[in-house]
Amino acid sequence: MAFGSSSLIWFRKGLRIHDNPALDYASKGTAALYPVFIIDPHYMKPDYNAFSPGSSRAGLNRIRFLLESLVDLDSNLKKLGSRLLVLKGEPGEVLFRCLKQWDVKKLCFEYDTEPYYQALDVRVKNGGKPPLTYQSFLKLAGEPSWASSPLMTSRSSLPLVGDHGDCEIFEVPTLKELGYEDTEQEDYLTPFRGGESEALKRLRDSLSDKEWVAKFEKPKGDPSAFLKPATTVLSPYLKFGCLSSRYFYQCLKDVQKIVKKHTSPPVSLVGQLLWRDFFYTVAFGTPNFDQMKNSTICKQIPWNDNDELFAAWREGRTGYPWIDAIMVQLHKWGWMHHLARHCVACFLTRGDLFVHWEKGRDVFERLLIDSDWAINNGNWLWLSCSSFFYQYNRIYSPISFGKKYDPNGNYIRYFLPILKDMPREYIYEPWTAPLSIQTKAKCIIGKDYPKPVVLHDSASKECKRRMGEAYALNKKFNGLVSEEELSSLRKRLEEEDDKKNQVQEVKTKKQKTIDDWMSTK
């Protein structure tokens, strides 16, 4: 490219200045640089028919986090003599128009493995077999090395922004300007602020405790810790590219040089970054990664279509306080601890309700501020025992698991204030409290707070039985289960359930008759 021509950096998820290879490349040998972000109505337009405030693709918390990240990016660009040019419209159309009008010779953007951006990249540009276990991924990938592309964590200036002609340029919009009302309502206000500046501050705060960083061990985190989360909460910043993953990795390796005794992948913080890349790799190389049907790696399981159970889970009214509190935190904050995510995902699918993992995936996709297409789908495949992990007999108890970390139920009391006065011994199982206790706690089960939608002991046993039947079917057909075979299994399981329910109804009626007769004696 001849010096003196124009370049355009198209910001999508790499919303940062530090360690941004696309920005570095766009800045070299250019007289004018156009830093652009496109407000896509497909992503931003309010959807008033959705189950929570937000657009058709994202909840309000994630949209707010994105806007905060853009404001911060604009501020950081201005410090370097540039600014963020916000455009509005369908990205492909807007980009083509600006490239032509501004006579741009070099277009740079961060590559993305998500299908939505993959399709967009094909339009803009005109035109192997993945490892399926973490261990095989590590063997294939090895230790990250960037000798050919060194980190750039600071810069003093950027090329000036060129003349934008007739193209209409906007400031970063507010939620109100996008059409959202009551944007400061407490019910949908995450405590985590977006932006590169906040990401680097949070990273510094985490790194200040080198012993904690070195000895971080994922399975030992406390999912009930909410005032000070038991993890870095850097995932939203990695998702939007406010924080460079390789800069984060470099910082972690620097800590390991100082603290010699440290944990290792997969449980360490370095391991968490590698998990991220593992799911990116598998997702990119696996057709239909985000669905059960037509997937080469997903077990075919006859999940039920019980919309009432699904709605109860989604809205945090299953009658299990631990599960409901997690779902309320998801709605309010757009984030929860990874073990809390494990609990509610297991409960919805193979643990209790036997509802399709794709439905849960869609809820997480909408509400999580750190929702990432590859990681979200990968985790739901894992936690539903549809792929990667197959020990379906290992189930998170909706009662005892949370109690292990938070016996007093402080987490539940915070996110479910209706239960704040429930005595400690009943906080995880309020339906077992005598009516007098419920009355004193101002929470009558079945009126102020729902009864359990299922009985965990019997529901989990039934889920295990169904999973066993599904696994046997997949083994029989070597994973190539037809829709007919799956429908046949679903029908048989439903018929068996109906028979069990009929037998139980007869037993219940018989017992009631005996009880009524005894009461007359």
Image (tube, rainbow, N blue to C red):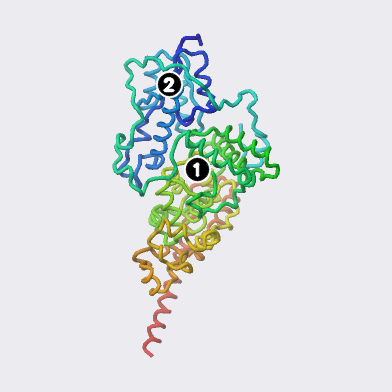
Q: Quadrant of the C terminus?
A: bottom left
Q: Is residue 181 above or below residue 115?
A: below
Q: Residue furthest bottom?
A: 521
Q: Residue at x 61, y 24 (%)?
A: 149
Name the disc covering residue 376, or none: 1
**47 vs 308: above or below:** above
Residue plotted at (58% across, 37% down): 277
Front position among marks 2 and 1: 2
Q: Give coordinates of residue 466: x percent, y percent.
A: 53, 58
Q: Quadrant of residue 286?
A: top right
Asked if residue 499 shows in the view, the reply is no
**Callout 1 secondary element:** helix
- Residue 86, percent from left and from top: 37, 26
Chain-order first, disc 2 or disc 1: 2
Q: Are marks 2 and 1 in contact (CB under 8 Å)?
A: no
Question: Is residue 370 in view?
Answer: yes
Q: Residues within 10 Å of mark 1 (few under 14, many from 20)?
A: many
x 57%, y 50%: residue: 474
Instruction: Please state the horizontal and vertical placement of residue 408, each as a whole percent of the image.
Output: 49, 63
195 left or right of 208? left
Q: Which residue type carries mark 2?
A: Ser
**Amino acid type, mark 1:** Asn
Horizontally, residue 35 falls left or right of residue 48, namely: right
Q: Which residue is mark 2?
A: 82
Instruction: Report x, y in % for residue 312.
Output: 39, 56
What is the count of numbered marks? 2
Q: Quick one: 260 or 247, which is closer to the camera?
A: 260
